[in-house]
C-alpha cells in the first residue's frame, strides 16, 4: 500500500493501546458506485475494498459474508489492513444468538451493529429483549450495539430514552438522522435536544448521515479551508449540518470519558443508495443521484477526524 493507506496503518500500529477513533466505510454505501460514476458497471468486491483502503478508511462495516466468500474476505481484509464489523437484524434474542455463533465462526468481527426489527414492541417486553441481547453479546465476547433507527425497537425517541434509563448496560449506535426525519425536526426543540443528549451518553459507535427533517439523507454542501494552525475548518450552509456535527462531537467526548485502554470508537460513513439517496430523472427516464455519495462519505471522514482532534 502507498500514500494515505500506509500512513493510516502506521498510525493504527503506533497508537494501538490508546483509545482511538476508527473511520469506517459502510459496505451498503458502496452499492451502485461503479454505475453512478459511469465507469461501466458495479465495481467488483476487490475493487471496492481497494478503493476503501486507498481512501484511508480504517475498516468496513458490512454484512456477515456467506461461507463461500469468507476466505476471500479474510484475504482482502488482511491484504489492505482493514478492520471489519457487521450488521444484524434479529426479531428475537434467539435469532441474535444464532447470528453471534456464525460471527464467531467467521472470526475478526469487531462488533455487531444491531437493528432489532420489533418496532411495535414496547414496555417490559422490549426492555427484557434488549437486556437478553446484551447478555448474549457479553457471553459471546462480541460487542452488540443497538442502533437508533426507524422501523426498529428504538424508532420512538421517548421509548429509547426509557430504555437507557432502565438498562445501565445498553450500548448504542447513534444515528440521529432517523429521529430528525421521523420527528420532522426541521429545527430541534430544547425538549428534543435534552432527550437526544441522554442517548449520547451511551454512544458506542456513530453512523454519519444528515437529515433535514424531511428527507433522511441530504446532500451536504460544505466549504472547507485550512486555518492558521494548519487544521481543517468547515463552513456549513445548512443549520442541521452544524447540529449533526455537534451531536457527533458530543458522542465522541462522552465515549472518550469512559473509554478503556485499547478501545475503539467506530465512526461509520453510512450514505445509502437509492431510495435513501435522493434522485432526479433525466429526459430518458434514467434516475441519477443528486449527490456524489463517495465524495460525501470522504467529506464525513475528514470531518470525523477533525472533530476527534478536539476530543
Image (cartoon, rainbow, N blue to C red):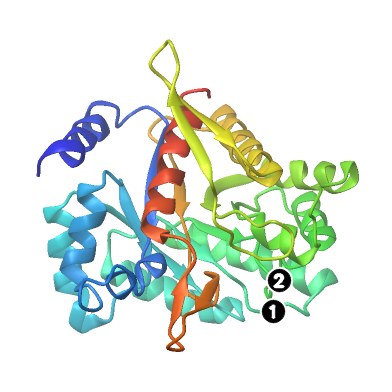
Residue linked to disc 2: 153
Q: Quadrant of the N terminus?
A: top left
Name the outermost residue toward the bottom. 285
Q: CA distance from mark 2 to mark 1?
A: 5 Å
The residue drawn where x is 20% and y is 48% is 54
Q: Position of residue 255 (x, y in %)?
A: 57, 36
Kind of element beneath mark 1: loop
**Marking on residue 118:** 1
Which residue is drawn at the image coordinates 69% and 56% (left, top)? 212
Front-lying residue, 38 or 13: 38
Circles 2 and 1, Cβ within 8 Å, touching? The answer is yes
Question: Dot 2: within a 10 Å radius of its alpha carbon, few (fewer than 14), some, or many (20 or more) residues?
Answer: many
The location of residue 169, given as percent across then percent down, is: 65, 50
Counting residues from the start of the chain, the first of labels 2 and 1 encountered is 1
Q: Say if residue 103 shows up in the picture.
A: yes
- Say how many tags the image has: 2
Q: Is residue 280 left or right of residue 14?
A: right
Left or right for 264, reference 89: left
Residue 255 in view (yes/no): no
Furthest residue toward top: 228
Residue at 12% from the left image edge and 63% from the top image edge = 75
Whether residue 75 is situated above or below residue 210 in the rendered picture? below
Amino acid at each position: 500500500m502507498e500514500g494515505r493507506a500506509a500512513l493510516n496503518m502506521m498510525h493504527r500500529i503506533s497508537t494501538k493501546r490508546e483509545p482511538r477513533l476508527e473511520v469506517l466505510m459502510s459496505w451498503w454505501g458502496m452499492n451502485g458506485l461503479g454505475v453512478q460514476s459511469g465507469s461501466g458497471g458495479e465495481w467488483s468486491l476487490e475493487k471496492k475494498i481497494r478503493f476503501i483502503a486507498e481512501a484511508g478508511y480504517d475498516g468496513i462495516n458490512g454484512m456477515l459474508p456467506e461461507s463461500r466468500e469468507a476466505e476471500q474476505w479474510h484475504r482482502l481484509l488482511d491484504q489492505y489492513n482493514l478492520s471489519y464489523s457487521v450488521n444484524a437484524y434479529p426479531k428475537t434474542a434467539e435469532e441474535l444468538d444464532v447470528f453471534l455463533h456464525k460471527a464467531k465462526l467467521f472470526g475478526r468481527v469487531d462488533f455487531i451493529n444491531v437493528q432489532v426489527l420489533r418496532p411495535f414492541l414496547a414496555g417490559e417486553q422490549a426492555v427484557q429483549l434488549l437486556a437478553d441481547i446484551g447478555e448474549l453479546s457479553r457471553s459471546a465476547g462480541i460487542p452488540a450495539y443497538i442502533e437508533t433507527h426507524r422501523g426498529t425497537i428504538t424508532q420512538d425517541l421517548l421509548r429509547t430514552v426509557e430504555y437507557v434509563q432502565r438498562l445501565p448496560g445498553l450500548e448504542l449506535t447513534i444515528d440521529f438522522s432517523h429521529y430528525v426525519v421521523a420527528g420532522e425536526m426541521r429545527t430541534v426543540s430544547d425538549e428534543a435536544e435534552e432527550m437526544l443528549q441522554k442517548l449520547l451518553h451511551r454512544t458506542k459507535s456513530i453512523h454519519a448521515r444528515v437529515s433535514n427533517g424531511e428527507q433522511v439523507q441530504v446532500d451536504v454542501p460544505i466549504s472547507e479551508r485550512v486555518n492558521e494552525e494548519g487544521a481543517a475548518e468547515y463552513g456549513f450552509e445548512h443549520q442541521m449540518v452544524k447540529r449533526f456535527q455537534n451531536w457527533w462531537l458530543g458522542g465522541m467526548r462522552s465515549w472518550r470519558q469512559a473509554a478503556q485502554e485499547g478501545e475503539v470508537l467506530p465512526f461509520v460513513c453510512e450514505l445509502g443508495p437509492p431510495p435513501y439517496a435522493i434522485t432526479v430523472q433525466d429526459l430518458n427516464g434514467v434516475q441519477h443521484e443528486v449527490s456524489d455519495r463517495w465524495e460525501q462519505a470522504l467529506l464525513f471522514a475528514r470531518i470525523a477526524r477533525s472533530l476527534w482532534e478536539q476530543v
